[in-house]
Amino acid sequence: MRRISNKALLIIFAALLIASAVWILIAGSIKQDELLAEIYVEGRLVHTVDLSEVTESYTINLPHNTILVEPGQISMSSADCPDQLCVRQGVIKSGIYPIICLPNKVEVRIARESGIDAVTGGRS
Amino acid sequence: MSIKRMAAIAALTAIALTIFMLEAQIPVVLAVPGIKLGLANIVTLAAFFLLSRRDAGIILALRVVLGSIFSGSPMIFLYSAAGGLSGFASVCITASFLTEKQIWAAGIISAIAHNAAQIIVAVLIMDSPALIWYLPWLVIAAVITGAFTGFSAQFAVKRLKDMGIR
């Protein structure tokens, strides 16, 4: 059986690293036009918040998570899962990365386009 | 199945499971979902090159099932099984091109396959295509963590063979 040289392996892995870095740079530069945050629980859209219209901070309580809505940004302020990854992801503003809580199936993302029938409200 | 082989599989499964459970207690360092060292993969890799493809598969399957039961989360099983299966398949495909001094590369390849499979499962479960943006982060993490686990397995295999244990 043909063997692969270490050099070839290193080139392949280096290429993968460079491609990933470029992808990350591209992802970081993508900004959404609208500041429409969507909150999904178990795949269902439960809240839509227009972050540009938020003047005072408030929280949205979900069964396992608390979401902090602030002017222009949104974050997960607490979750009952052990890893707390979603909380440590911090605030999102206009970027492409969603906040996700895998154990509780909660996702907060900035919508790609406006015009979705907004299910606002439900402050608690 | 010989008693020696059964004992080897049992011992390695116990080691893998212990490492898996211990690692689950270590807090995650980075706020990117899915990044961890994957230390239990050292055992799978070592078994693959030390024993056989089949034995490594058995050890991996036992660890994934028992690990999910012990950690008490059915979700962990889905991610763990998808990652484990994909990582194992990738090593099966590439192992014939690699020597015993290139187990580090098998570690990287299986870590990348593992992470890619988990992201795909997450996209399907969460119904969120945007999660794919985390893939490059996970590829970079996989190259680093995979090299670490791969080298660990490589040194373990070399030591055990030098000692005459197979």
Image (cartoon, coloured by chain):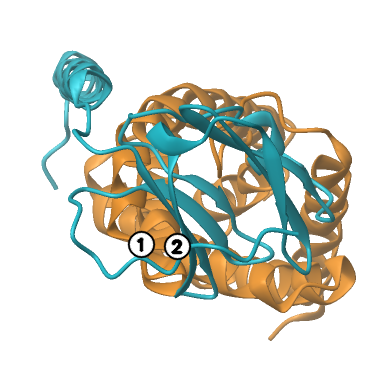
Chain colours: A cyan, B orange
Say if labels 1 and 2 share a chain.
yes
Q: Which residue ends up furthest to the bottom in the rendered image?
A: B1
Would you name the residue on which mark 1 appears?
B128
Q: Is residue B8 above or below residue A14?
A: below
The amino acid marked with disc number 2 is Ala
Vertical arrangement, residue A103 with respect to residue A100, above or below: below
The label shown at residue B64 is none
Quadrant hosting residue B165: top right
Left or right of residue B117, residue B59 in this image? right
**Could you say where residue B86 lies in the image, as x and y percent from the top left?**
39, 63
Q: CA distance from mark 1 to mark 2?
A: 8 Å
Residues tagged 1 and 2 counted as in contact (Cβ below 8 A):
yes
Mark 1 crowdedness (10 Å alpha carbons): few <14, some 14-19, many ≥20: some
Q: Identify the element where label 1 is drawn.
A: loop
In this rendering, would B118 be left or right of B81?
Answer: left
- Disc assigned to residue B122: 2
Q: Of residues B38 and B27, which is closer to you in this image?
A: B27
Q: Nearer the viewer, residue A103 or B21?
A: A103
* Residue B33 in the image: above or below residue A95: below
Q: Is residue B39 visible?
A: no
**Residue at 75% in and 59% down:** A124
